[in-house]
Amino acid sequence: MNKKRIIKYILLFLFFYVSLVFIFTLSRSDTFVNFGFSYAISKGQIPYRDFNMVITPFAPFLYSIGLLMCNNILVYYLEQALLLTLLFYYIDKILGKKSILFLLILIIPYPIAMSSILFPGYNYIVVLLLVMFIYYFKNNKNDYLLGLILGFIFCTKQTMGIVLFVPTFYFLIKDREKFKKMFIGYIIPIIILFIYLIITKSLYVFYDLCFLGLFDFNKSNNNIDIYYLLLFILGVVYLLFRIIKDKNNILLYYILLYSLVVFPIVDYYHTSIFLIIIFLIILDDYNLKRDIFKYIVIIIAAISVLWLFVTYYFLRPISIRNYNNFSLVINEKSYNDNSYKLIKYTSRLDKKVIFFMRGSENFFYKITCDKKLNYYDLPNYGNYGYNGIEKIKNRIKNEHDCYFVIDRVLVKNNSSEQQYIKELGQYVIKHSRLIKSIGLYDIYYKE
């Protein structure tokens, strides 16, 4: 690799790191939850057994490596900047000079919130692995490696890992040797995963959370944003158009099945992680004239800068505050002020404190207070396995002489898009006594 390419990747790394910490931080979505999984693992906790998680564990384990040295979210962002730079290594190989346009599409916040893809988590790892698969598949690389990548996708997000292996059965008919090699590569990381689950005595609870729990998840999390549904349909139509033109291109069938990543929650985030691959295919398909290319770059860059200006200077007063394990947290000033007050108040309580708000808030406060994660920290529909709500309600019944922190707005929210199990919050309120309110937070004592 020559000096210019090395400098290019160093600059990309720095750009991604600054973007994660300062520029796109208000679009971070579930970053605190994903950070929490890796934080807990770095502290020796066992997924599924010690805390609930409904994905296979490759991504949390991968991100936990850096946290073994320093348990701060800035290290988490540092790891993500490296992984984003790795993504662009493969994007460069696929698109060449057009990779700059892919970068601009990735960071554009409007009208499609692609910038949310920048943040660390299991969905990003699936995107990275799929881009690697596309590159190696297009270049007829080692079949064992192709299968291995699909196996790691299973170990990152089990539903995608199962779905994306389906087109491989085409080779069972056309090229049995290729299928055999890909299957061997695919099964290796999965076998290692199940050995780990057996050793840690978490196999059954893994099955309950990650497979049986999907019935509750799909039943309760089926929100559809019409705007993003239309964008999703356009992406699928383009894929079908390409398949009609090139029916023997098996790679397109992998990407078509990848479109299922959007369901059951068709929103800006899940649609974006599908459309980013569609944009990759489109850019790979077409050569843009130099003038058109230049104008597209200018337009996207202008939209991104304008969005940032509007967000930071008009929509909300923001502040930067340092917390334990969370440095340089950018948020609304009122939110940061209330967070500081809540942490100060709960740290003085002499009994057990259970944060029982939305998952990102619970993880933030637990990690800030150096507390271990547990099954109360991610109270979302479908996150507790089969018949999970009753399981957690029974746990709450058996809690005595402790405090619960509730977000009163969240409990009263009637939005169909809400993932928080508000009936559990309502149960806490009904069987506890209110002792303190701090902003949106109510602290209850359960005797």
Image: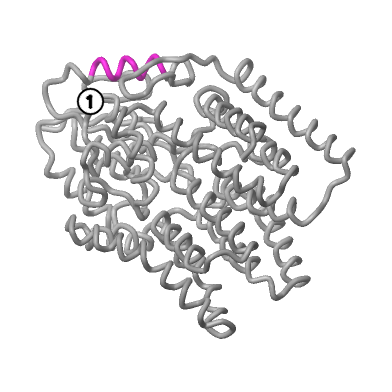
Graded by Cα atoms within 10 Å as few (under 14), some (14 to 19) or many (20 or more), the crowding at tag 1 reads: some
Q: Give the left or right position of residue 363, taking residue 321 as reference.
A: left
Q: Residue at x 38, y 68 (%)?
A: 187
Image spot of residue 50 (x, y percent)? 21, 46
In which quadrant is the N terminus drawn? top right
Which of the pair 416/72 is nearer the observer? Answer: 72
Q: Is the residue 193 above or below the residue 365 in the image?
A: below
Q: Give the left or right position of residue 425, taking residue 10 as reference.
A: left
- In the displayed image of the protein, which residue is found farthest to the bottom? 173
- Write down the region rendered in magenta: 336-345
Q: Residue at x 45, y 67 (%)?
A: 162
Q: Give the left or right position of residue 144, taking residue 195 as reference.
A: right
What amino acid is labelled 1 in the image?
Leu
Image spot of residue 101 (x, y percent)? 73, 40
Q: Residue at x 63, y 52 (%)?
A: 277
By secondary structure, the bulk of the magenta-drawn segment is best described as: helix
Q: Residue at x 66, y 19 (%)?
A: 309
Image spot of residue 225 (x, y percent)? 60, 48
Which of the pair 184/311 is nearer the observer? Answer: 184
Image spot of residue 12 (x, y percent)? 60, 31
- Count the labels in the image: 1
